[in-house]
Image: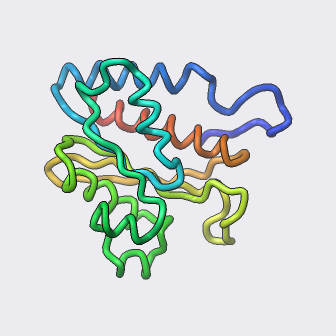
Amino acid sequence: MLQCVPESSLERCVNPQDIPNAVESLALQLTRQRLMVVTAESCTGGGIAQAMTAMPGSSAWFERGMVSYSNDAKQDLLGVQAQTLASHGAVSEAVALEMARGAIEHSRGHISVAVTGVAGPDGGTADKPVGTVWIAWGQKLGYAEARCFQFEGDRDAVRQQTILEALKGLIARLQ
């Protein structure tokens, strides 16, 4: 897991070129394999989709992005079950997996990434402190896997780290 430098430092948690470089690598793999990606985002508020679509020509491999910030949106846009949300909470492996699968089911994408977490500065609990993020990756045939991260730093740092890890996870799954 990534460690962030204090907010007051001049350095950043994520190098400014890390995300564009990851997008470029992802784009090459998706293009070679003739696959489309879809995003389902909560705590990043569309940041992953924004990073992808900042690259010219992304329409060749980016299918769509869904921002499902509220629990109702997770249910309406992605088919996350109310029972899953009630039993596990929005920031959970179960919800992240349902988001990743739902993104595929509600799109023409072949591979998905879903994120749900607590970016801060408030909203954390003892069980799910600020910086807790679940990232899930899904595939057209129904397979999905999720991983929990505990990022440090302010809201922007947590979101930037989440975007980078989401992209790196997509790249790893396409290799």
The image shows residue 95, relative to residue 58, as above or below, that is below
The image shows residue 84, relative to residue 97, as above or below, that is below
The image shows residue 46, relative to residue 15, as above or below, that is below
* Quadrant housing the C terminus: top left
Instruction: Examine the image and state in which quarter residue 54 appears.
Output: top left
Q: Residue furthest right?
A: 8
Residue 97, image x, y percentages: 34, 59
Residue 154, image x, y percentages: 72, 46
113 with respect to 149 (left or right): left
Instruction: Examine the image and state in which quarter residue 95 appears.
Output: bottom left
Count of numbered marks: 0
Residue at x 48%, y 73% (from the top left corner): 89
The image shows residue 84, relative to residue 113, as above or below, that is below
Residue at x 26%, y 58% (from the top left corner): 102
70 with respect to 57 (left or right): right
Of residues 76 and 168, the one drawn nearer to the viewer in this rendering: 76
Residue 140, image x, y percentages: 17, 47
Colour approach in the figure:
rainbow
* Quadrant housing the N terminus: top right
Residue at x 39%, y 65% (from the top left corner): 73
14 with respect to 23 (left or right): right
Residue 104, image x, y percentages: 22, 51
Residue at x 35%, y 36% (from the top left corner): 170
